[in-house]
Amino acid sequence: MKTSFIMNASARYVLWACVLLSLFVLLRGHNEPGGGFIGGLIGALGFVFHALARGAGATRAVLRLQPLTWAGIGLLFGILAGLPALLLFGEPFLTQQWLGATPIGTTVLFDLGVYLVVLGFALAFVLPFMEA
Amino acid sequence: MNWILALIPCLALLAVPAVALGLRARPALAPALALLPATLFGLILLLPLGATFRLDWMPAFGIGFGFRLDGLSQLMALLITGIGAGIFLFSGSYMTSYPKQHRFMAVLTLFMAAMLGAVLADDLIVLFIFWELTSLASFMLIGFEAHKPAARRAAQQGLLVTVSGGLAMLAGILLLGSAAGTFTISEILANRAVLATHAFTPWIIVLVAMGCFAKSAQWPLHMWLPNAMAAPTPVSAYLHSATMVKLGVYLLARLNPAFQEWALWQGLLTGAGTLTMLTGAVLALRERDLKRKLAWSTVVALGTLVTLIGLEEPLAATAAVVFLLVHALYKASLFLVAGILDKKAGTRDALMLRGLGRHMPLTAIAALLAALSMAGAPGFIGYMAKDLLFTVQLGVPGLLPLVALLVNAAMVVVAGVVAVRPFFGKPMEMERQAKDPGFTMLAAPLTLAILGLVFGLAPALISVNLVEPAAAAILGEPTGVALGDKQATEIVYYLSLVVLGLGVIAFLAWTRLQPRLAAQTWLDDYGPDAAYGRILRGVSVISGAVTRRVQTGSLRFYIGASVVLMFGGTLVLLVAGGGLGLPSADPLPLPHQAVLVGLVIAGAVAACRLQMLFAQVMAAAVVGFGVGILFLTLGAADLAFTQFTVETIAIVLLVAILARLPFRELDARRREEHRRDGAIAIGAGVVGFLTLLAVLSVPFDTQMPDWMGAAAWPEAKGRNVVNVILVDFRALDTLGEIAVLLIAALAATVLLRRARGK
């Protein structure tokens, strides 16, 4: 398919802008609308745009790992976030823990896991279509 | 010290990946792996009887990682690790010709870990998990040579039979747990008085027995065991004679103190056991393949054990324990001999194998010693077992004594055919002269066979330390029987001589007897194995017919059927449940909301009326974004945010696909099809609307949202309640959801890859 020069040139910037925005949305999610799910979708949007402009092969190169691998890493993060409670504090699995009085805790890791799974899931569906 | 108990299965489990990776790099190290079971064997000997270990797992349900070593589990654990050491040593050499030896040894290690976990578990749920793990390991090992169709069928059959039995058992376990108020086995047995009168008990007995019968190959579920001989020989020796098939017997014995007074328990066990013995004996005589012949005799042994547990006579517990031990020793040894013969002489056909003794003297000695123990020759531990067996079985009224005599005579024949006949007579013709294998392959069969003689000559070695504690665990109280005491009366002594003589005569006539039995093809045509095949074919015919009706390949049909089912079902429930209603207070939309609603309606109408696909996508987008903005005006910011993002991705994706895929014609539907689809769409919309009204007419309970709103900041340090619910309050649900996403993505990747490959 023919792609426009503008799309081709802007693809990189749109991609990284989307990724930055998605990370912002991911992190603000605890207090304002946002979170891992929406963040992951926005991130996926950036990659889809990139793939439209430059082809799925180029996007896969940017991703480095397979989308499924990213999703797997995400699921691993989700499980890992639940382990400190179980192993260190004798509480049920997935009882979230915090670093002292700060709002930083295992929830960040958990939400990052959700983010990666959603991102990987969306791209695992979309990228093969763009290659077909 | 007690933590060592939990360490034993864990150590074996942790070794699995190390074995797989280590042996792939250095296959020559395989025989050294025998050190693992040998070490575990030593650890078990170190532990005192009665050692317990417990770690809470799901305290709310009373489920924990409970482990306990008593006489019965000690006997089983020693058999698993002791025979395991021999099998690992044997496999190290035997399996070198197989390309995936490292995988084989890793699964064998996994199996050992699962077995140890199952027999050491003091919690029914933990026991069940390890139990199923042994089924999985057995599946992988039977199907190890997956290129052979027979191996694949046998693996599937073994798995289906044992896992279906396992499902019944799980139901039984859950009932047992709720009846006894605990899943801890030692507590259940201590408070067994509760079960004596409980209404659940008959159900528990039947369901648990089903699981144990499937695992321990009781009639009519026995057919999977001979077929499992498709596995490499070490597997047959280890899983399918010495250990795994005894797991069902083990659990029956374990729970026997709780149920032994129930007539149902006694009848079920003795009935199934006796039928199993008889079936196994007849089919063992009929078989020519050494391994399958041994498998049928294992079926006989399992039937004998189940019968013994079902008998009320206290001496039966001691008989069961001694016979379990004896059988494990001689049967594992004979299987390994069969494996050596198969490898060295190139056949397992009992009619062909002749005169090998001269060139394989050590193999012949192992075989003869094991066979003498099996036949119950004086001086061997097998004699003691037979003595106990006859004393117990002859005291029972009914057909059992007769069956027991015939079956034992048949076992003498099997011992003769498998272990005597191949080594004597005129030497068979073969391309290369068969010779004794090396130390690693001879060590196990020789040691196991010699132990049968050692224990027979000096029963004191095992009487107090091994047999009595195990028998006491089966009985629920001390037995007061010392091994080596003369149990038998004169009549039992003469009867056992008669059986031996009968067996020897039948053995001499076997070459003439076997073809006649083999001619009875109705045994195959109407047996449980044929029934299994018919059931499996029936299932695939039915599912094929259903699939052809449901999976028409038309996307329009799928969507139509799904929508009709979903909304039709909702309507039925709504009307039948009396849920129809109108909200009492109905705030009218604000002016800007009314405008948005108008926009959404216009978008929907446009999507239906427009002719161009691209324009239709845009019109549908108007609907999506309009709904998103509507969410925003109603204060559902998160929902709106998600709606926008999903909508954007959907449009980008649809446009990308539309631009690449060639669409023939836009809409080929006929007029009446249009009407039908329109009716479905409008119907679905109306039902959705009615549902919303019904939901709004119910007063809204604010307790949960109030609590969550109040707790979000102090408990979870977040102000966005929606996100706090997702990542904290209901994090386990979210974990489940992202796992589902991942599975869906996995499936989609496989499907898309296959579609592209075509």
Image (cartoon, helix red, strand yellow):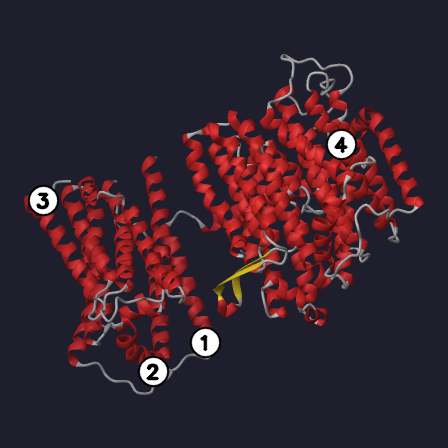
SS at mark 4 in the image:
helix
The residues tagged by marks 3 and 2 sit, at their Cα atoms, a distance apart of 51 Å
What numbered label is drawn on residue B702?
Answer: 2
The residues tagged by marks 2 and 1 sit, at their Cα atoms, a distance apart of 26 Å
**Residue type at the position of mark 1:** Val
Foreground tag (3 vs 1):
3
Write the residue at 62% across / 52% down: B165
Q: Are marks 4 and 2 on the same chain?
A: yes
Chain letter of mark 3 equals: A
Chain letter of mark 1 equals: B
SS at mark 1 in the image:
helix
Foreground tag (4 vs 1):
4
What numbered label is drawn on residue B371?
Answer: 4
In this orientation, which residue lies closer to the viewer: B361 or B530? B361
In this rendering, the answer to whether B291 lies above or below B190 is: above
Which circle's residue, 4 or 1, is located before the other in the chain? 4
Foreground tag (4 vs 2):
4
- Residue at numbered disc 1: B575
Residue A73 location (% of width, % of height): 30, 50
- Residue at numbered disc 3: A8
- Side of B146 relative to A3 (left or right): right
Outermost bottom residue: B585
